[in-house]
Image (spheres, helix red, strand yellow):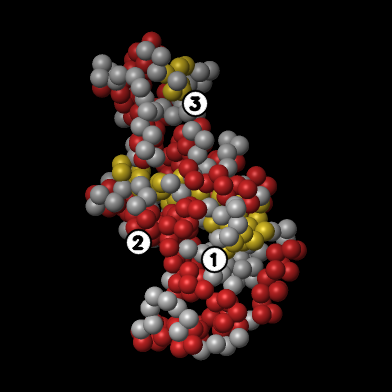
Amino acid sequence: MIAGLLRAELGPIEPLVLVINDSDAESIVKQLSNDQSPHLTKTLTECLETWRRRVRQADVFRSLEILRSIGGNLVSSQSSYWPEQLNDLQHGAPAALWLLGDGKHLLELSESVAVVGSRIVSDYGKVVTKDVVNTLVKDGKPIVSGGAIGIDAVAHQRTLELKGLTVAVMAGGIDRLYPAQNLDLFKQIAKTGLIISEVAPGVSPTKWRFLQRNRLIAALSQATVVIEAGFRSGTINTAGHANELGRPVGAVPGPINSVRSAGCHQLIKDGKAQLISVPSDLKDLCGESDYFEKDFTSLGHWELRALDSLGDQERSIAEISKVSGLTSFEAKTGLNRLAKLGLATPTSNGWMKC
């Protein structure tokens, strides 16, 4: 926040020059127009000590050399590619973004949706994540996530399979992609999407940097969808940033006894997230509530449950019965009526939503 204040007052370059040239806090504060309080001077003194341990002019040149060697790009807040939604972070906005991939994709993120969740993912979580991504990508939404194993990786991978745009926001430098298990995935993302970091090449990911980068995931996206999250997790932290920014948050419920979904349930209970249970909920979350223009008031119990269990990908009767809680007979009966109404269609191995 202090760094953001200095950039807002003195521009993007002058604060870095002052830090490198060992200017003291009192002389810097005198150049600011808004706040010259002793508290600011004390806080800035502490910040300068931290910054000078990390920043040297030689480090800047080394970071740029690494960037060139890996074929990356650097986009500042002055660039025409800069995603304006990051400015909603005010003094907490990054000064620049280090990228792997085509920087032009930054301009496509105004309607992106963050899909985030637990690193330890269940089969249910994988299925739900793919369904959520299927719906969003079909509607032209880029997918933003954190590149972690679990829900993040499933969201990125499914978007790539659907030829959609996906962006992974890193906690360390773009030359130190983490986790190593996802390196092949990161290479795929960089080819058609973007790998983003606010920290320079050479910087290692740390626990606090993961929490810090979560605000970027929330700010880049028009909405955030949480799938499988514990009470205390980085995912809940991302949802909190989205709440603070006034961005809508959606949470997918899980089994009532699932520890993995406890955070999702709490978000919904506290009114901090909208319930996401059917594709139309995603449209509502993004403020585009025209997903279904048909009147469903005439549908019976079996039809409604069968319809809610369908996605954009083929599902067998056994899968539909499991998701809907219907027997095979009830599911088939409901699906046959939905087919007559033009709401579902049979396939060679199952059923799909029309």
Image coordinates of residue 171 in percent, x first then y, are 53, 64
Side of 165 relative to 38 (left or right): right
Q: Please rate how many residues cluster around mark 3, counting C-alpha atoms within 10 Å: few if below 14, some from 14 to 19, many from 20.
A: some
Amino acid type at circle 2 is: Arg
Q: Residue at x 55, y 87 (%)?
A: 23
| Marks 3 and 2, the one that precedes in the sequence | 2
Please state, as top left, top right, bottom left or bottom right, where the N terminus lies in the image: bottom left
Q: Residue at x 55, y 77 (%)?
A: 15
Whether residue 354 appears in this view of the structure is yes
Name the residue that disc number 1 marks: 95
How many numbered discs, if any?
Answer: 3
Residue 327 drawn above or below residue 178? above
Name the residue that disc number 3 marks: 314
Q: Which of the 4 image quarters holds residue 147?
A: bottom right
Name the residue that disc number 2 marks: 232
Residue 44 drawn above or below residue 177? below
| Marks 3 and 1, the one that precedes in the sequence | 1
Give the distance between the C-alpha atoms of the residues marked 3 and 2, in whole angstroms.
35 Å
Amino acid type at circle 1 is: Ala
Whether residue 257 appears in this view of the structure is no
Viewer-nearest of discs 3 and 1: 1
